[in-house]
Amino acid sequence: MQKNEQIWQQRYLAAPKQLSKLKNIGTVIAAFNTNIDAVVKIRGDELSKLAEQFDLKIADIKNGVNQLCSVRDVVRGICKCFINGIAEEWLCQDAAIAEWMQKNLQYERLQMGGQAGIIANLAAVLGVKRAIVHTASHPKKQAEQFLHYKNLYAVDENAELQQASTMNRVNDDALIHYIIEFDKGECCTIEGQNFTAPRANRFIATYDPANMHLKINDGFIKYVDENGYDFLVLSGFHNLTAKNGGEERIGEIVPLIKNWREHYPSGVIHLELASTQDKVIRRVILEKIAPLVDSLGLNEREAIDAIEIIAPDYYKKNKNEVLEAALMTEILLKIKEKTQTPRIQLHMFGLYVTLQNADFRINVEQNRNGMLFAAVVAASKAGYGKIEKTEDLLWSNIQNINVPELAELQKLSECLNMPELLSEGIAKLGKYDIIAVPTLIVPKPLTLVGMGDTISSVSLVSAI
Ligand code: GLC
């Protein structure tokens, strides 16, 4: 084995020791979007039938907007993701479309959905003292998606904590998102033409009036006002649209965040950007929320989308380039310059990259520890399919998945002319620190949903 591979394997073997430190962390709050994911597996022949039934044209798939205005759009969205092997989420405003999905899409299982819900479940397994989640709606069906842990709380209307898995607001609606997954190699026919899915991926069809308006419980706001947090992980802005008054809604939430920041300066606020289709909202998030937080998490697609807003000319020049690490790092720098967020972390296939101010309160070694542990947990989630118990976190480690593929890191260190980045994963990039960690690859992942949320939150909370 090559020397650098050995060095990284040693680091990966040591990564699980982060776990024992996590019980010292007090409060991790995850807000705002929690929902239920209904996972549907679609075969190529089933999709062909739907495409025929709705007389779908290839031109519609190529040119249409990323929105669900009719049932036909649901089929169009699945086809678009299927033939390109990509992941997208489209929103719908019409209850009739949701009803059609309920009747016509058979789900295999229900599971926790939404960044906040996924992160809260995970934080509880990590063993922090209190994982607290915001739920816009909390009927029994939602409660059932929370793990049955005593350190996992939701907040009631009187700002009191209650165990999330046992809370039941009987009058609330269940907010169900359809996660329509397909396997690599499945074949479907559209307009007489055959297509093969180049990658396993998913299309999300969302009808969720509460989260689409970013409804927040008063009890939750009061709780945070009065008690603070060690980590506050924010997401859910991506579900807003300009048409729905999303810009005004962000305008109402900005003072809340400013207030929390001012009152709890030792707490760390992280924003998980998530895929934001509406460009007006994307701009407002980047201009108004990103500059307020300590840390920003995003994947390569979300980074490119951000650049479309921040640097349109640069975007036009690079939008069709291969999204490899050197280009992504250049893009991260641009985002960082624009938003001035002290820490930015990119998670991409094969590599995580963090750029941060030299005086950031989490130092470079702590960041590297957190990122390595996040890769262990992400590989466990991908390979085992779920994280519900402490031992699930370390599944990949126990399976001896601990030698990372160094190709992306190697290219990056060569491009930046920084050999120390390849061996140490830590270097100086201008006035910033850069931390880059090669990840663990699971050949046949059982799940990919919520992977970004997992990586960002674990690498931040366990950066100790
Ligand atoms: C988006 C979807 C949600 C899914 C999550 C995964 O928030 O709306 O259904 O669980 O992404 O990251």
Image (spheres, rainbow, N blue to C red):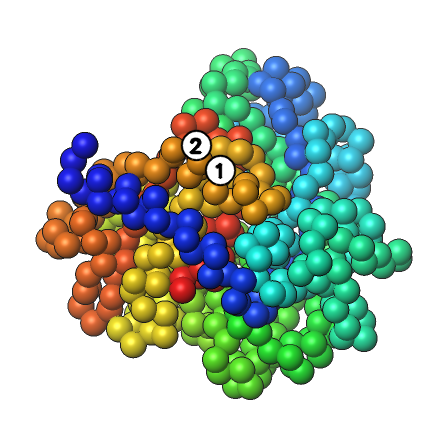
Residue 43 picture location, percent across and down? 60, 20
Q: Is residue 446 above or below residue 166?
A: above
Residue 64 picture location, percent across and down? 54, 39
In-front residue for pair 446/321:
446
> Is 273 left, or right, of 315 in this rendering?
right
Q: Residue at x 58, y 18 (%)?
A: 44
Q: Within the image, what quadrant is residue 138 found in?
A: bottom right
Q: Which mark is residue 395?
A: 1
Question: Is there any visible trace of residue 313 in the rendered image?
Answer: no
Q: Residue at x 64, y 41 (%)?
A: 205
Residue 333 picture location, percent across and down? 28, 63
> Is 321 left, or right, of 67 in this rendering?
left
Q: Amino acid at mark 2?
A: Gln
Quadrant that contains the C terminus: bottom left
CB atoms at circles 2 and 1 under 8 Å apart? yes
Question: Is there any visible trace of residue 100 in the rendered image?
Answer: yes
Quadrant that contains the N terminus: top left
Secondary structure, mark 2, is loop
Q: Which mark is residue 371?
A: none
Q: Amino acid at mark 1?
A: Trp
In-front residue for pair 419/390:
390
The response on whether ligand 1 sits within 8 Å of label 1 is no
Q: Residue at x 50, y 50 (%)?
A: 454
Residue marked by disc 2: 399
Secondary structure, mark 1, is helix
Q: Within the image, what quadrant is residue 155 found in?
A: bottom right
The CA distance from mark 2 to mark 1 is 6 Å
Q: Is residue 334 above or below residue 49?
A: below
Q: Is residue 2 above or below residue 164?
A: above
Q: Residues within 10 Å of mark 1 (few under 14, many from 20)?
A: many
